[in-house]
Amino acid sequence: MAFDYEKYLRPGKLPHIWCPGCGHGIVMKGLIRAMDTLKLDMKNTAIVSGIGCASRLPGYIDCCTLHTAHGRAAAFATGVKMAKPEMNVILCGGDGDGTAIGGNHFIHACRRNIDMTYIIMNNYIYGMTGGQFSPCTPTGHKASTTPYGNPDPNFDIAKLAIGAGATFVARGTAFHANQIDKLIAEAIQHKGFSVVEILDDCPTTYGRRNKYKSVIEMMNRLKEVAVPVKAAEKMTAEQLQGKVLTGVLYKDDSKSDYTTEYAKIIERAQAKK
Amino acid sequence: MAKKVEFLQGNEAAAHGAIYAGCNFFGGYPITPSTEVSEVLSIELPKIGGKFIQMEDEIGAMAACLGASLTGAKVLTSTSGPGLSLKQELIGYGCIAEIPCVVYNVMRGGPSTGMPTGPSQSDVMCAKWGTHGDHATIALMPASVQECYDMTAEAFSLAEKYRMPVHVLPDEIVAHMRERIEFREPGEIEITPRKAPTVPPEQYKPYDTSFGDVPPLADFGSGYRYHVTGLNKMQDGFPTTKAEVVQAEEERQVRKVDANIDDIVKFEEYMLEDADVVVVAYGSTSRSARYAVNVAREQGVKAGMFRIKTFWPFPDKQIKALAAKVKGFVIPEMNLGMCSIELERCAQGKVPVLGIFRVDGEPINPDQIVEKIKEVK
Ligand SMILES: Cc1ncc(C[n+]2csc(CCOP(=O)(O)OP(=O)(O)O)c2C)c(N)n1
Ligand code: SF4
Ligand SMILES: [Mg+2]
């Protein structure tokens, strides 16, 4: 039987705002399947986003949804989780939202290891505002504000998350759609701050400026560059040139998460009273 | 039972006033001269099972507060000028998404880093106009340590009652001076709870105006699933650009305060019955003003004081009534004439408005005010 997405979607809110060929919808379907796998209680689940095309995702899903301000999802979500640790808190948004204006909140959520899952849809561009370069736009590529090619070096989101203290970091792609739900489900189950970067595409503002003739071509590129971590172990440095690792890149179950630690603070304070 | 009495600083008193009101979440970022609020709450909140979090910056602090508030927590953040500037983005979010929260901002010199330890009253306009777009504002002005306690507690009730951010704006003098204060007994200050939904989850809309200008707000995680956005929205919380909906919603969000000005606005009248000259004052400056009024009276000038306790919404009605019967206003303030603008607006040119404006980090002393009182002819 085909998977029934509808029971997780808010009635009357489709069609979505995304362009034909945009990868964000693939990620949303992956998230829904992950929620289904884990039988998440929708009444007790919050999805928090920033601003951007990717950040429009929560509105379609029938749970507690919070579409915040540009870059601020992690900070709002931290408040939700701290105040109600029993809630499942999922964050989502774009590469620009999470690593530029929201970069500070992002690294500090990683550092606190607060038990939330952050899905970053990396399409290498500011899609919503018409294709300006983001901290994830590859050097040399074209954006509406890099007419001569992007002079900026770009972030590796996964490395950034690991360096900042996230205890679960995974990467998938919009092409490998049937792995997205598995990565997200594993991330949600992880107790601590988990980050799932999904490489996706923005045919409208990035693809056309960077000589991709079609969405299929963009998807094929994702297929070509992705190498599962297991497979990479058997590959030489030369073979890995220009490739991107996918799968669970980092996992540390030894660290306690933030709300568990804060519960201990409460215990200590109350013992002293 | 004897009341609990302590000798406290304004900031410490504010923290206890927050606890009195049921505050159970604080999100902040350290900044002089407001830090004592967070220090006290880092001790007190976990004792009552509340949460204290020091965020990475003031934007994050404001965000955490709004997120926590949506789960039903009673939230406070404290800051000072540079932090208030940063919080503006999300104060606006609190306005449009209608999320209760209290912003306690100790006024120091500015703009920018200004004078971190110098007193000032120069954030009164920033509290009102700092965030972009049209919105209602409530701002309270404590003039004593007791009022830091009381007004912070009252701010929580106003935030819940009107479903919006509420400012408490002590100046650095009030925030840092020490006075005897009484801890309030339960019931002494009215604590208004959040208006919870009465409809089942399937029928719930977060901006349902059939319940009045302040729609009930459900807690995240309580069985109600709904959407919150900073975009202009419909009653169900989803974005819209429909002209008539946007217009009506924006007007409602301002009206919910405007139509209740008499409930919100508090002030003190000191020797106003026969006054010819009215000193309009707020915060610590009102303490000098009171003294100056006494001195002026001794010297035969019929002076009085109108003390602003609620700066926003501005007490238009009261000031306009005074303007119709007195000879002039004197306005001492630790800025270059902010309240003065409002006074002139209300005086409508009928009487002079004489200002004493100080931004040198020194308090305004009574002598200066007495002199100005005498200038009113
Ligand atoms: C404070 C602020 N600055 C700028 C913007 C404009 N803005 C809206 S979305 C966006 C970029 C979104 O890019 P990304 O997060 O990568 O999401 P995408 O649209 O690519 O999915 C920008 C710059 C804004 N809404 N708020
Ligand atoms: S502009 Fe790009 S990111 Fe936005 S919906 Fe269209 S394809 Fe997707
Ligand atoms: Mg993007």
Image (cartoon, rainbow, N blue to C red):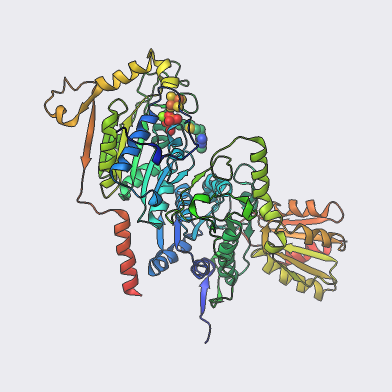
Q: Is residue B276 left or right of residue B42?
A: right
Q: Residue furthest left?
A: A234
Left or right? Give the position of B216 relative to A153: right
Quarter of the image where the N terminus of chain A is located: top left
The answer to which of A249 and B377 lies nearer the viewer is: A249
**Relative to residue B242, is residue B289 depicted above or below?**
below
Q: Position of residue A18 (x, y in %)?
A: 45, 28
Could you say which is closer to the camera, residue B372 or residue A140? A140
As displayed, is residue B46 above or below residue A242? below
Percent of width and height locating residue B167: 59, 57
State how many labels appear: 0
Residue at x 57% of width, y 76% of height: B187
Q: Position of residue B282 (x, y in %)?
A: 68, 63
Location of ligand 2 given as a quarter of the image: top left
Q: Residue at x 86, y 63 (%)?
A: B326
Task: Tell me, yes or no, if residue A109 can be seen here.
Answer: yes
Left or right position of B172 against B24: right
Q: Is residue B55 visible?
A: no
Of the 4 image quadrants, the one containing the C terminus of chain A is: bottom left
Specify the farthest residue to the front: A1
Looking at the picture, how far across and down is residue B364, in whole percent?
Answer: 67, 62
Residue at coordinates 70% horizontally, 54% vertically from top-left?
A: B258
Q: Is residue B168 above or below residue B303?
A: above
Residue beneath the point at 41% across and 52% down? A80
Give residue A187's quadrant in the image.
Answer: top left
